Amino acid sequence: MPQTFHPRANAFTKLILLGGAALLIVGATALVQLNWSNWSSGEEVFVEQPVEFSHEHHVSGLGIDCRYCHSSVQKSQSAGMPATHTCMSCHSQMWTQSEMLKPVRESYRSGEPIQWNRVYDLPDYVYFSHEAHTNSGVACESCHGRIDQMPLTYQANDLYMQWCLDCHREPEKNIRPAEFVYAFGYEERLDEQGVTDKERLAMGRRLVEQYGIQKGRLTNCSVCHR
């Protein structure tokens, strides 16, 4: 029987199969890397806003407390965004002609709220309560990073489930006294005071009891998925 395919066809077929397998491996690896990249998680990605608000200027420069603008952070699931009249309590008297603040003045005149773009956008199936965290010794900077050093706001952590679980499994490593929940540079302050890791852990365990944190329940699915 005459040969249908040239002997080189076998080598060509093997080359195609090997190339296809390599392409699948490279593609799968690229997808995994993309899924864990900042582009996917939003970590360290600046979000454009209608007003270039600087937390660095307002917090570090002027000493404004987080709760002045985010007034519901201690009593609600949402931290809340400031009403325009909160901004105008200062800016009706300073920077009154600033072009950058024109959207603030227009919002105040029209009564239409400023449409801020969300920086931390959790999926709909995730329940997160600012009230529960801040009243249990979890600081703003624990999730939002050193926002007091951010001229423009970005997401400081990846917000993946593993990141949340790391804290929920060992809350004693991440909570602090109530008077430091809205303070920045807490760990650096402990370093300056020479507080050891062992002492910090012991303090954290005392705080877990003080806040009434039921550590065994923190990893229950229903805590975050309701």
Image (cartoon, grey):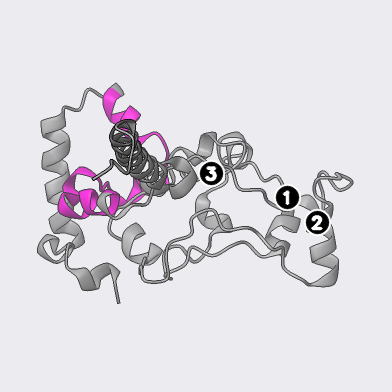
61 over 223 or under it: above or below:
above
Whether 153 is among the magenta residues is no
Q: Specify the amino acid type for callout 2.
A: Pro
Whether 176 is among the magenta residues is yes
| Residue 125 quadrant | bottom left
| Residue 222 quadrant | bottom left
Q: Specify the amino acid type for callout 3.
A: Tyr
Tell me if label 3 and label 2 are in contact, CB under 8 Å. no
Mark 2 neighbour density, 10 Å: few (under 14) some (14–19) many (20 or more): some
Q: Judge by depth and name the residue closer to the eye, 211 or 218.
A: 218
| Tag nearer the camera, 3 or 1 | 3
Q: Specify the amino acid type for callout 1.
A: Val
Q: What is the CA distance from the residue labelled 2 to the residue labelled 1?
A: 7 Å
User: Between disc 2 and disc 1, whose residue precedes?
Assistant: 1
Please identify the quadrant where the N terminus is shown.
top left
Please name the residue that numbered disc 3 is placed on: 154
| Residue 108 quadrant | bottom right
Q: Secondary structure at mark 2?
A: helix
Q: Secondary structure at mark 1?
A: loop
User: Between disc 3 and disc 1, whose residue precedes?
Assistant: 1
Point out which mark residue 103 bears.
2
Please name the residue that numbered disc 1 is placed on: 51
202 over 82 or under it: above or below:
above
* Residue range of the region highlighted in magenta in the rendering: 163-191
Q: Secondary structure at mark 3?
A: loop
Tell me the residue at 61%/40% (across/down): 152
Tell me the residue at 49%/44% (across/down): 39
Question: What percent of the width, then of the height, locates residue 75?
Answer: 42, 70
User: Is residue 156 rendered to the left or right of residue 154?
Assistant: left
